[in-house]
Amino acid sequence: MSQPVTARATLVERLDALYEYDREPVTPRDYHGWKIFWATFAGEHIAGTEFVIGPLFVMHGCTATAVLLGLLIGNFLAVLSWAFVCAPVAVRTRLTIYWQIRRLGGPWLTVAYSAVYGVVLCLLAGSMLRVSMTSIALPIQHFFVTSGEVPQWIWIVLAAVVGSVIAILAVLGFEGMAIFSKLSAPWMVAVFIMAAIATLPLLGCHSLGDFWRVANERIWTGATSIDPTGGQPYTKYTIWHVIGFAWLCNMPQHFGMADLTILRYARKWQMGFCSSAGMYLGHYCAWVASGILCAAAIMQGIKTDPGPIAYLGAGLAGALCVVVAGWNVASPTLYRAGLALQVATPNWKRWLVTLVVGGAMIICACIPALLAHLDLLVTTNALLLLPLGAFIFIDLWLFPRIGLQSNYAEQTKALISWPAAAAWLFAMIFSLVAFSYQANPIFLVLPEWIVAVVLYVIFSAVQQKLLTPSPLPAAASA
């Protein structure tokens, strides 16, 4: 437990006192209510990714019907996943995902998962830092760069400065990030919506009656754009891509149980429905708004990076919104990464691990290709991390009902659970084989979840029923 902090405590001692229940269940005195979770979900999902993903639907040739209806359905499925899959597990265990995996998979598997997750989170946080930088670079590009692109050394300096601020926010822990989200989320929603409305006249929409015509003719036209990094047209997206992406882009958080780390602070499981604030204000309104901004930028011959399109729609307020939006995703992403990698560095404090991960985020932010292929990064994240989250759900809710022991690695003191390791490996091999046959990664996430669950149940039954000489005491499965 954390020790009292005196007035003369050193900075390190004060940082050490930022206790986040890294290795044990959250206690009732630190549970939070509805307001915190409305703000947390809104802040994280009305954020930097929205300035990138909304334009992707424009450039991948979606139609207006595919976007507006597909997002409605896909986001509804995502809310149900948080509320009925992730949140009940979170309030029952009160543990981070990393220590719940340790109980069922053993320490070695936990270290492997945490290392993979930490790397992915660094890439995601770096891409969100890059989003903020595209806005901060605007005055530099306008006043100091007379021709061509902003020099790479300037991007590196921006990454270091802005990334340091984001890392400090992450070090403050869950409550500090929630306060920042509570203050910024309502303002960001207003900026997104007003920026989109302000740019509609540039597209020829001067009244509500014009919107549907303009949406089909000039925004979501069904025509794909050229990928600037490869020179080839983007893959065409249909309504099924939109539904799948809206539901599955956050699958590591809900079906994959990563948001156990956040929702373990919730007083009741019903707070999983707070995800609707992020899904419908962020992944619906903000994706639609940023798509409109992207279409207007293309017509004006403006670069479609987040900063320029937001400035086109809302001026300085739009540019500032991009900065805050990037912070609102990067900070909780770093927070998760710090908790993940602390499993592999048990003698390090969370704040120190978070700062080290912040350095990795800054390096990743210097890679411009991250934004151009954010959709591929998000789906790859889901494919890599989803299976072990599925095992947590099955281990907790299904195993006791079919006569199998929960948390078997913990009960037997095994260093690694071979059923979990084998099911994780084979599920990823399944996805790789399917991908080699040109399967779209968006459509592989749910099949991989099913394959992983079936294999885990079969392997666990073999281990516990056929290979174990005698059953564990009944109390051991509690």
Image (spheres, rainbow, N blue to C red):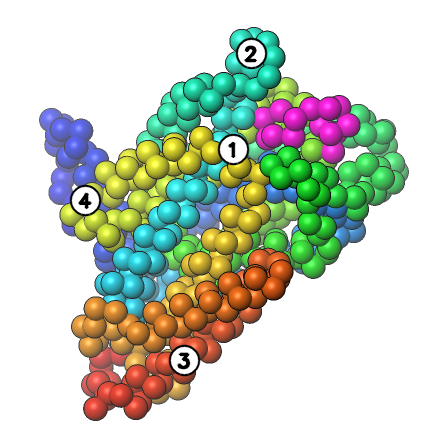
SS state under label 4: loop
Foreground: disc 1 or disc 3: 1
Between the residue at mark 2 and the residue at mark 4, the CA separation in whole angstroms equals 43 Å
Q: Nearer the viewer, residue 66 or 284?
A: 66
Between the residue at mark 1 and the residue at mark 4, the CA separation in whole angstroms equals 31 Å
Q: Are marks 2 and 4 in contact (CB under 8 Å)?
A: no
- Whichever of labels 1 and 3 marks the residue nearer the N terminus, that label is 1
What amino acid is labelled 3 in the image? Val
- Whichever of labels 2 and 1 marks the residue nearer the N terminus, that label is 2
The quadrant in which residue 459 appears is bottom left
Screen quadrant of the C terminus: bottom left
Q: Which residue is mark 3?
A: 457
SS state under label 1: loop
What amino acid is labelled 4 in the image? Trp
- Label 1: few (<14), some or many (≥20) within 10 Å? some
- Whichever of labels 2 and 4 marks the residue nearer the N terminus, that label is 2
Magenta extent: 295-308
Between the residue at mark 1 and the residue at mark 3, the CA separation in whole angstroms equals 42 Å
Q: Which residue is mark 2?
A: 145
User: In the rendered image of this protein, does residue 149 appear above or below residue 232?
Assistant: above
Q: Which residue is mark 4?
A: 348
- Label 4: few (<14), some or many (≥20) within 10 Å? some
